[in-house]
Image (tube, helix red, strand yellow):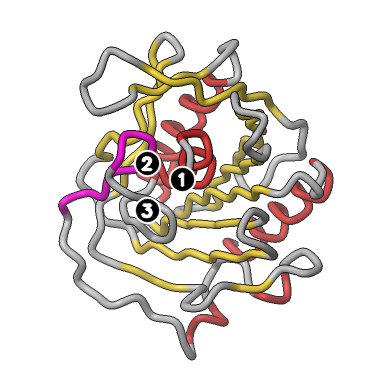
Amino acid sequence: MGRVSSFTSAVVLATLSVAVLATGASAQRTPVTTAPRTTIPTVSPQAGTYPVLQQADLPNGYQMSSGTPQRRTGFSASYPTIDKCIWNPSNPFSGLTPVVYSSLFSRTSEDNGLETLWEFDDATPAKAFYGNLEKAYTAATKCKVVKQPSSAGSSSTFDIGTFSKIDAATLGDESLVVALEPASKLQPATKYAFFRVGSSVAAMRITDDSINAKEFTALAKTAAKRAG
C-alpha cells in the first residue's frame, strides 16, 4: 500500500483512539494510543443495536466486514491538527475514554468504507472533540496541497492531496463533509463526513469513485440517524 493509499484508508482514523480497522504505526497511518484494551470487541448479538451503520444501510454490492459492527472500551480519543498545511494525525484528547463503535464495509479491496463513533458521557466533551475535527479538516480545505511528515519528527514530507468541502445539509447537531483528491492519480478519491449527535461524535469515509457526493451524503444522513 502506498503512502497516499495508507492515508486515505486511515485519515478518518487519525482522529481515533484505537486501531479499529485500518491503522498502523507508520508515519502515514494513525498511531495507536498507549491506553490498554480492557474489553474484547463485541460483535453479536447486540451489534444490531449499535449506533453505527448496519448491513441494511449499505450501498448496493457492499457487505459488512467480518467482526463488525463492533464495540470497544478502554481507549483514549485523539484528533488531527494541521499547521502550514502539514498534517499531524494524532493528538491526545483530554484523557477521556469514550465507548467506540465502528462498522467496516466493502465491495472490493479498493471500494470500501468505515464509520467510527465515539460515545462520550456528556455533550460537553463531544462538542469539544467534534470542534477539533472540524477545525483540522476545515483548515485542510484551505490548503493547495496537504502534506505529512515522511516519518515521526522528520522535516521531509510527502503530498497527501487536496481537500474540498461538499455542500450538504447539517447532519445531527453539527457536521462537516469533505472530499480528498489524492496527490497520486493511482489512488482513488475519498469522501469524509464528520458529525455530532448529542454526546456522540462520528467520522465516516468511503473510498469509491462510483459513489457521488449526493449518494455519499445520503449514507452519512443514515449514519447520523443511527447515531441519534
Q: Per the image, is 31 magenta?
A: yes
- Residue visible at 62% across and 37% down? 187
Q: Is residue 214 above or below residue 97?
A: above
From the top left corner, tell me how far across and down residue 179 is, in percent. 67, 33
**Which sits in the foreground, 136 or 160?**
160
Contact, CB < 8 Å: mark 3 with mark 2? no
Task: Tell me the distance, in whole angstroms, between the alpha carbons under discs 1 and 3.
Answer: 27 Å
Q: Secondary structure at mark 2?
A: loop
Query: Which residues fall within the magenta stretch?
Result: 26-34
Q: Earlier in the sequence, mark 3 or mark 2?
A: 2
Task: Tell me the distance, in whole angstroms, between the alpha carbons under discs 3 and 2.
Answer: 29 Å
> Are there few (<14), some (14-19), or many (20+) residues within 10 Å of tag 1?
many
Q: Quadrant of residue 8?
A: top right
Q: Amino acid at mark 2?
A: Arg
From the top left corner, tell me how far across and down residue 167 is, in percent. 77, 31
Residue marked by disc 1: 10
Q: Is residue 155 above or below residue 64?
A: above
> Are there few (<14), some (14-19), or many (20+) residues within 10 Å of tag 2?
many
Q: Quadrant of residue 115?
A: bottom right
Residue marked by disc 2: 29
Q: Amino acid at mark 3?
A: Asp
> Are there few (<14), some (14-19), or many (20+) residues within 10 Å of tag 3?
few
Contact, CB < 8 Å: mark 2 with mark 1? yes
Q: Which mark is residue 122?
A: 3
Q: Quadrant of the C terminus?
A: bottom right
